[in-house]
Amino acid sequence: MLHHMIQQNIFMNIKSITLGALLLIAGTTNMKAIPYSPEYLLAEDAEAQEGNMQFIPKGNFETWTSKTIKESGIIGGATVHLMNIGAPWASSNVWAKVSGVTKTNTSVYRDSHPGHGSCAKLYTHIVEAKVLGIINIKVLAAGSIYLGNTIQPITDTKNPMAKLNAGIRFTKRPRAIVFDYKAHIVKGNRIRQNGIAKGSSVAGQDMADCILYLQKRWEDARGNIYAKRVGTMVHRFSSSTGWKNNQSFAIQYGDIRGKSFYSSAWALTSGATTKYARNSKGRMVPVKEVGWAAANETPTHIVLQFDSSHGGAYVGTVGNTLWIDNVRLAY
């Protein structure tokens, strides 16, 4: 799902720099409906519709925002212009201020899609910082965009997923997600790079991905959020390709565990893959997926993310790149 880097215990008293905190960049009794979420996406809220297509707001990536961040002098003091798409989208372009030290990560860029204006470019790279010009910290960061928002500045190194408010309210039943994409997939084993130590090899090919979940969420009296999975679509990009426009990927409804295409990538979220959301009390809590909804259920939320690497925190291949444009839903 989205790709995130929390660097723990960095060295001497510089552990507070924990670059991973900023490099977040990856879901009873007295039940009640969830009243709060970042955005509510309805057909009439979409930027445009074409026939049976509903464009996700800002899913053509033509308008971006910029925020200027001055990094701390102890790690070089660079001035960075963080680019972001804007609500309802968030990305792995984030900044942190941990124990007075400010650092940024940029792994999503505005790029051009010939004949279609701008697009989003997601890039896997190594983020480096030299502390006092001596200690060189390196962390692998994937490029990610997702529907929701990131709590910024990141101010601590605890529980990176709790900084990502994943998903927006959504009550439709699309048959597919449609988008344009281009991919550059670097062949060979992946690496794990998460600090001062030299990176290590990780067996297996890196791939970019797109993950879509339709969830039916509810909240109990204590503020816990639960969900059943209504619909699922997971696609991994395993080879390089030029632009492919209007590509459609079917959303599968209900319990899909018996389907021929099913694999662990399509499973209910748990452990490290658990998403977080802000509850009605204003707290970030895990969204606990407790089962599969009936195939005819109506969702309350959509979770959608694109990533340039699929292997989780710190793992990927430098240079892996995914370009995305014109994201919409088909009915």
Image (cartoon, rainbow, N blue to C red):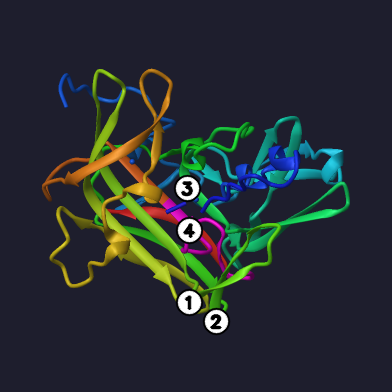
Q: Secondary structure at mark 2?
A: loop
Residue that label 1 marks: 205
Side of 211 where 298 appears, left or right: left
Q: Residues within 10 Å of mark 1 (few under 14, many from 20)?
A: some
Q: Amino acid at mark 3?
A: Tyr
Closer to the chain start, of discs 3 and 4, is 3
Q: Amino acid at mark 2?
A: Lys
Q: Could you say where residue 131 lies in the image, as x and y percent from the top left?
A: 82, 48
Between the residue at mark 2 and the residue at mark 4, the CA separation in whole angstroms equals: 18 Å
- Closer mark to the observer between disc 1 and disc 3: 1
- Closer mark to the observer between disc 3 and disc 2: 2
Q: Could you say where residue 110 lies in the image, as x and y percent from the top left?
A: 65, 55
Mark 2 and mark 4 in contact? Answer it, CB < 8 Å: no
Quarter occupied by residue 31: top left
Residue that label 2 marks: 187
Between the residue at mark 4 and the residue at mark 1, the CA separation in whole angstroms equals: 13 Å
Q: Which residues are magenta?
A: 305-320
* Residue 282 located within the stretch drawn in magenta: no
Image height of 126 relative to 93, above or below: below
Closer to the chain start, of discs 3 and 2, is 3
